[in-house]
Structure formats: structure tokens, C-alpha cells
Image (cartoon, helix red, strand yellow):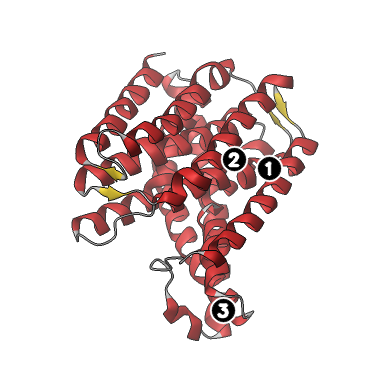
Amino acid sequence: MSILFILIGLALLVVGGEFLVRSSVGLSFKLKLSKMVIGLTVVSFATSAPELLVSLQAALNGFSDISLGNVIGSNIANLGLVLGITAIISPLVVDRDFYRFNWPVMMLFSIALYFLLQSGGVLSRIEGIILVVSLVVYLFFLIRRAKKVKVDMADLDETLEKTSNFKIIVWLLIGGVALWGGAELLVKGAVDVAGMMGISERVISVTIIAIGTSVPELAASVIAALKREKALSLGNLIGSNIFNISSVLGITAIIQPINLVSEKLLSVDVFWMLGFAFILIPLAFLPQRFILSRYKGLILFVPYVIFIGLAFLE
């Protein structure tokens, strides 16, 4: 039954996330927000909703390891699993904004998370506020930079501009209920499975839950790569990691401070996250500049498989 809870929970998170993105974009058009702002901010917030609901639900229920492990594991999965598999299927072009702005900001947030957790073993409300404020500053500079360069809005569904108010409300309700129900079932199922298998909540969160909340990005990227379309925006993936730390953990900590229960999240998992983030720079430049080729995809994917294996062996 616990496995069924996990499967239903993941399905509800995927459905809820999709409806929330559609309703958020439709509402943004109604509010006359520019397509650039919608693409850079609204969509990013909406796609981080599954991680937010899962982390918040876990923190409120007293499972802090799941709150932290979900975000750390999702960030690892975004780079090792999603980016790795996509590059293996179809090589990706790296834009210059990646190393000039997006990558340094992602590293800054990742390192900041390590020091915040190390300093007191808890993400307090004040630290949550600092993370959210830092996100606002990041978005300010992101939008300002985007005004100076051409922004690709290929992932923005412009047909949503004509969506009726009734549809937006219905989508918003479906998305909200599905995300809440999915988070509830996923956390309950994961905790039960961890207990039955004798493994920690931390292992379940950095593996099964993290992969589950990354499934929508993986599916979309693989389908696009197989169709030889623009498979993935590296900037969007980096942005997702920034949002996971700043908005998901930030908002969760403001509502319910997050305690560091398992030391391995700090001594092992965070370093895997930092390692995957750091290696993107040499991969982007060596030996072929600005191309993530198939073998570079393998360099990301194989260590991810090792990470998952080691997590379950501990």
C-alpha cells in the first residue's frame, strides 16, 4: 500500500504541477505581465511547486530530512539525471550567459546552503527570509539582464493568453488540490517504505522522492531531444536549482524551521550537489567549447548512478 501511495503521489504531483503552470501563465497574461517576466519568474515558481509542497508537508509533519533531502536530491538529479540523459540523446549548446551569470549564482546559493546548515544545524525563519530576499535580488538582476539580451521564450505556450477566467480558476483548483494530495501521499508512503526497508528517510528523499519531483523535467527533455527539437535550456535547469534552494527551502523554513537530522546530508549529499554543479564549468569548455556532447552527458550520468547506488548501500 505504501508503494501505491508513492506512485499515486508522484502522479498527482505531475498532474498538479502541469495544471498549476498552465493556470499561472494564463493568469499572468490576464494581469498584463510581459512574456519575458512570465517565462523567467512565473513558470519557474510554478515548476518548483511540487518540491515546495513535498518539503513543506514533510517539515510540518516533523520529517526534516525529507525536506532537505528532497531539494538536495532534486538539484543533483537535475544535473546528473536530466542534463546527463538529455545530452546523451542529443548534444546541447551552452550559451555564454551560463558561465557569466547563471552558474556563479547557482554555486553561490549552493555554497550558502552548506554554510547555513553547518552553522547551527537548522534553517531558521531568519535564514529562510534571507534566502527568499536573495531570490528576489536574483530575479531583479535576471530580468534586467534579460532586457539587454534576446530571451528565448520557446517554452512559453502563447495559446494560454486567450484562456478564459473560468478555465484558469478550474486549473488552479485542480493543480492546488492535486499538489496537496500528492505531497501528502508521497511523504506518507516514503516514510512507511523507509521504515519497512530499514533505510533512512534521508536516503528515500535524495533518491526516490528527488527523482519523482524531477520526472516532469526529465520527460519533457527526453521527448524534445528524441524529436531533435531544442531539448533543454541549460539556463532553465540552473534556474530550477536556484529556485529549489531559495524559494522551496526559504519559504518552508519561514513557515516551519528545518532541522538537520541526518549528518550525512551535510557531510555527503551536499558535496555531491556541489560536485555536480562545479563540474559543469570544465565540461562547458573542455575539450570542445560551449558544447555538452554525448560523452560529457555520460560523465554526468554515470556518477549519478554511483550516487544512487552508494546512497542505498549506506
Contact between labelled residues 1 and 3, with CB atoms less than 8 Å apart: no
In which quadrant is the C terminus drawn?
A: top left
Mark 2 Cα-neighbour bin, 10 Å: few <14, some 14–19, many ≥20: many
The residue depicted at 45 percent of the width and 53 percent of the height is 236
Where on the picture, by quarter, is residue 24?
bottom right
In which quadrant is the N terminus drawn?
A: top left
What residue is pinned by disc 2?
A: 245
| Relative image position of residue 196 (x, y in whole percent) | 44, 23
Label disc, if present, on residue 29 of the rendered structure? 3
Kind of residue at disc 2 = Ile
Kind of residue at disc 1 = Gly
Please give left or right for residue 31 compared with residue 150 in the image: right
Q: Is residue 104 above or below residue 22?
A: above
- Report the Cα–Cα distance between label 2 and label 3: 27 Å
Q: Residue furthest right?
A: 126
Contact between labelled residues 2 and 1, with CB atoms less than 8 Å apart: yes
Mark 3 Cα-neighbour bin, 10 Å: few <14, some 14–19, many ≥20: some
| Relative image position of residue 87 (x, y in whole percent) | 26, 44
| Relative image position of residue 34 (x, y in whole percent) | 57, 75
Q: Nearer the viewer, residue 149 or 78?
A: 149
Classify mark 1: helix, strand or loop. Answer: helix
| Relative image position of residue 3 (x, y in whole percent) | 39, 38
Whichever of labels 2 and 3 marks the residue nearer the N terminus, that label is 3
Label disc, if present, on residue 130 of the rendered structure? none
What residue is pinned by disc 1?
A: 250
Where on the picture, by quarter, is residue 302?
top left
